Each structure stands twice: as C-alpha cells, then as structure tokens.
Amino acid sequence: MTSVTLSATPKGNGYQATVTYSDGVAISSAEAFPSQAEAISAAALRLLDMPERLERFDAPEDESRDAERDS
C-alpha cells in the first residue's frame, strides 16, 4: 500500500515537520514551528513542492525503480 504521512515531533521549543513516504524515505524540516498545526502545514507544503515523488506512486514498477536509482 502506498502512503504519505505528515507529522510533527517536538524539537527545541517547537515542533519539527516531517514527510514520510511508504518506501521509508523521510524528509524533515530544519526549522522548528511554534505549534503542531504549523509543523504539519509546513510538511504538507513541502510535499506539494515535490510532485515528482507523488507521481512515482503511479509509475509502473520498472519505471519507479529507474527513477529512484537516477535521483
């Protein structure tokens, strides 16, 4: 099953935004946000800035592996 998880984890005096893909790749923000809602919103915006990652979910298995190797 393909999934994307947006999360917020405590970091310093705030929360760190994280986007986690079903293949195990996780991308976290360098900055901390004052609230969990702001961190999750930042993770969503980060996800929208990387449409090629989402497009790989619909690619045939062979193309998906080629794209992973070439990135």
Image (tube, helix red, strand yellow):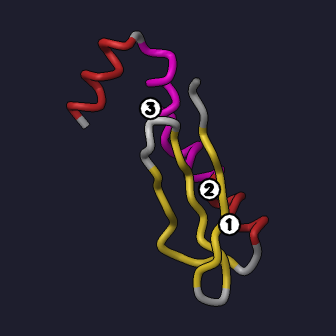
Q: Which of 47 and 6 is in front in this view?
A: 6
Left or right, residue 54 beside residue 36 = left
Amino acid under disc 2? Ala
Look at the image and give the residue range highlighted in magenta: 44-59
Query: Mark 3 touching mark 2, by CB under 8 A?
Result: no
Could you say where residue 62 lies in the image, as x and y percent from the top left?
A: 30, 12
Q: Name the residue under label 2.
A: 43
- Residue at 29% from the left image edge and 26% from the top image edge: 67
Task: Identify whether 44 is placed above or below 68.
Answer: below
Could you say where residue 60 lies in the image, as x and y percent from the top left?
A: 40, 10
* Label 1 crowd bin: few (<14), some (14–19), many (20+), radius 10 Å: many
* Label 3 crowd bin: few (<14), some (14–19), many (20+), radius 10 Å: few
Prevailing secondary structure class for the magenta stretch in the rendered image: helix
Q: Name the residue under label 3.
A: 52
Could you say where residue 14 lies in the image, as x and y percent from the top left?
A: 67, 82
Amino acid under disc 1? Ala
Q: Which of 59 and 10 is in front in this view?
A: 10
Could you say where residue 24 lies in the image, as x and y percent from the top left?
A: 44, 43
> Which label number is shown at residue 39?
1
Q: Distance between the residues labelled 3 and 1?
A: 22 Å
Can residue 3 be found in the magenta stretch?
no
